[in-house]
Amino acid sequence: MSTSILPPVARQPDAATLAQPGAAKMWQSAKDFEAMALGEFLSPMFETVGADGGGAKGMFGGGAAEETWKPMLTREMAKTMAAKGGLGLAMPVFQQMLKMQEVQSEKAK
């Protein structure tokens, strides 16, 4: 017996869905959106690292290089998190994009 109340949510579209015209690009865009959102969530956390004078701002940390590379590190961490499932934003965004495409197709007829 399952203790979960909610049904399982698909983490990625099935092969038939991705075979639709333009679906693969939409799926990639949805994953990129999730990575961007995760990056925005992570960014404030890294802005406070070492802000109290300890930690990374000691003898071997800080400086211009750290400030240059920190956004890139945050972005790559967000991409990795999104690729591993992230927050689950990509699938609903992708489904909404498919619905929008269907509406556009219906209007064009």
Image (tube, grey):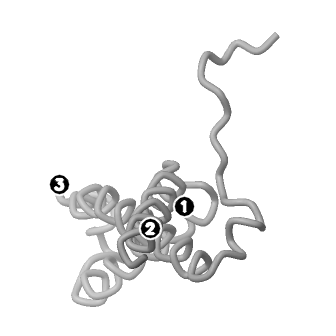
- Give the percent coordinates (x, y) of residue 14: 74, 60
The residue indicated by pointer 3 is 52
Mark 2 Cα-neighbour bin, 10 Å: few <14, some 14–19, many ≥20: many
Query: Horizontal placement of 16 versus 50: left or right?
Result: right
- The kind of residue on which mark 2 rests is Ala
Q: Which of 41 and 2 is in front in this view?
A: 2
Q: Nearer the viewer, residue 54 or 2?
A: 2
Residue at point 53% right, 62% down?
A: 82
Viewer-nearest of discs 2 and 1: 2
Q: Looking at this rendering, what residue extends furthest in the left direction?
A: 52
- Give the percent coordinates (x, y) of residue 68: 28, 88
Question: Closer to the N terminus: mark 3 or mark 1?
Answer: 3
- The kind of residue on which mark 3 rests is Asp
Task: Decide: is 100 above or below 109.
Answer: above
**The N terminus sits in image quarter:** top right
Residue at point 60% right, 55% down?
A: 85
- The kind of residue on which mark 1 rests is Met
Residue at point 17% right, 54% down?
A: 52
Mark 3 Cα-neighbour bin, 10 Å: few <14, some 14–19, many ≥20: few
Question: Closer to the N terminus: mark 2 or mark 1?
Answer: 2
Secondary structure of the residue carrying numbered label 2: helix
Looking at the rendered structure, which numbered label has been put on residue 98?
Answer: none
Viewer-nearest of discs 3 and 2: 2
Viewer-nearest of discs 3 and 1: 1
Q: How far apart are marks 3 and 1 (CA)?
A: 28 Å
Q: Quadrant of residue 51?
A: bottom left
Looking at the rendered structure, which numbered label has been put on residue 81?
Answer: 1
The residue indicated by pointer 2 is 35
